[in-house]
Amino acid sequence: MSEVAVDGNAMAGDLGEIFAVDVTAAVATCAGCGRAGVVAELRLWVRAPGIVARCPSCGDVVLRLVRAPDRVFLDLRGATRLELRVPSP
Amino acid sequence: MNIISPGFGGRRRSSRADLPPGQYLTHDFPVLSAGPTPRIPLDRWRFTVTNESGTKQTWNWPEFQALPYEDVTVDIHCVTKWSKLGTSWRGVSLDTLLADTDTAADYAMVHAYGGYTTNLPLEDLLDGKAWIAYRYDGEDLHPEHGGPARMLVPHLYFWKSAKWVNGVEMLIADEPGFWESAGYHNYGDPWREQRYQGD
Amino acid sequence: MARAAVSGRLTWRVATLAEARWETATARTLVLDLPDWPGHLPGQHVDVRLTAPDGYRAQRSYSIASAWSGGGPVELTVQRLEDGEVSTYLTDVYAVGAPVELRGPVGGWFVWRAAQPAPVLLVAGGSGIVPLMAMIRARGAVRGRQPFRLVYSVRTPDDAYYAGELARRVRDDPGLDVHYIYTRRTPEDWPEPPKRISVATVNTHGWPPDFGPACFVCGPTGFVETTADILVALGHDPRRIRTERFGGTS
């Protein structure tokens, strides 16, 4: 099968180059259908010019990541909100 | 950090002087996709040209197959660095499809089943530079490669050759499509290595 | 240690192959020396990057198979895939003493934390056993008391990773149970024909939902989706089910 849909766990490394905290456990709210779920559960298409992460419920694109040699583009317009846990003081 | 993995050659490929900068020649045909492969029954397939006023011209599959077609052999260049030379396609020229389109627009947005989009100047679709291709290498175009039909505009990086194409929309003002809005170059000329925004 | 394992900007580091061993005819465990490794939680993975002399690069993710006890090498188990550009290098070519670039540890969601008291259900499909084995090893290293049940689906007995070690751990630790599912060929004395994972199997060999287990499911996408559906159908809380899908090619 040429479609290799993995999940958001597979982008932990690429997101780890941008964010100082792990983002796979963050809850993303889909701008399309409103489903809130962890980034780790997004359906990832990695065989593309960039990474495309889709909502497991409605299939809309939640997040896109493009890696240039010296830049990373992270497009989050498909997520209305990202919620991350931070340690309480 | 520049360490080499001893004994690693990767997939069979070579770089050559006649390829655009940064490209490698590949002998297979990699399949890249931003989402699930749409499955479009031919009796539901439509191709629609929409002008800037919203006027539509639509062809169904039998009508499309009845249009004059061309057999072309072209080189294709993917922004992920693979190039494939001498690929053979059959398709309908955009010159044919846009012959009766009344437009003053300078830009176009290509639409596809599944929601993918890509934008380009209208002139880059005309004068023998683009086709809606429905056969590759002597066979019906496979779904994984964009079948029933895909855009073929080989002078630009291959992300502009939208798979599962279902229409072209004329735009008065340019708007970025799927990869262009995600960081890829708005135009995408492989010979000037226009891969990313700002290149 | 938990904070160090999941935060901090990531960069590529160079590991050296200290030793290697075959788990099956096509799965190879790489024992990697990684100076200054910050430690990792069981379930996390690393990205491995290969570079050819002409600069061409290929990168894949591999789950960490070993538990971290404060020092020592980090182990990955790599399944050789027929068309695999990276996996075939790591199984067929990569030699002891050679370097490889690695980024990690990454992944803070698909992890088991020893401080959690709940019983644990692990469901592995094929190479999906790797991160779950790290969890079993971590529990063993801290002498965890939480009961663990593993349901491990493989094609044939020859495809099971860590078979000897799992048998030894089950023998020595009453809190660990392992049930195998064979989908193509069973061992000689197996009481049933080959079959795929089913509601009945998970019902019998998993935990009842009202025990509130933490469920970890890992393997090919289809296997994970089927198993997650089974768990939900049996009444498990979807929020207690954590999944990791492996792509099947290259």
Image: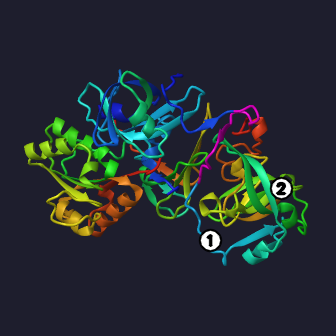
Q: Residue under circle 1?
A: B40
**Residue C105 occupies quadrant:** top left
Amino acid type of the residue tagged 2 in the rendering: Leu
Tell me if C55 is positioned left or right of C89 in this view: right
Residues drawn in magenta: B16-33
* Magenta segment includes B58: no
Image point 25% across, 26% down: which residue?
A: C70
Q: Overall secondary structure of the magenta stretch?
A: loop
Residue C104 at least partly seen: no
Q: How crowded is mark 1: few (under 14 residues within 10 Å), some or many (20 or more)?
A: some
Q: Residue B188 at x, y = what percent?
A: 75, 43
Q: How crowded is mark 2: few (under 14 residues within 10 Å), some or many (20 or more)?
A: many
The label number, if any, that marks residue C224 in the structure image: none
Give the chain of mark 1.
B
Q: Residue under circle 2?
A: B125
Amino acid type of the residue tagged 1 in the rendering: Ile
* Magenta segment includes B32: yes
Residue B53 at least partly seen: yes
- SS for callout 2: helix
Q: As rendered, which of B127 and B67 lies closer to the eye?
A: B67
N-terminal-most mark, 1 or 2: 1
- SS for callout 1: loop
- Quick check: A19 above or below B155? above
Q: Residue C92 at x, y = what percent?
A: 40, 35
Q: Residue C218 at x, y = what percent?
A: 33, 52
Q: As rendered, which of B129 and B11 lies closer to the eye?
A: B11
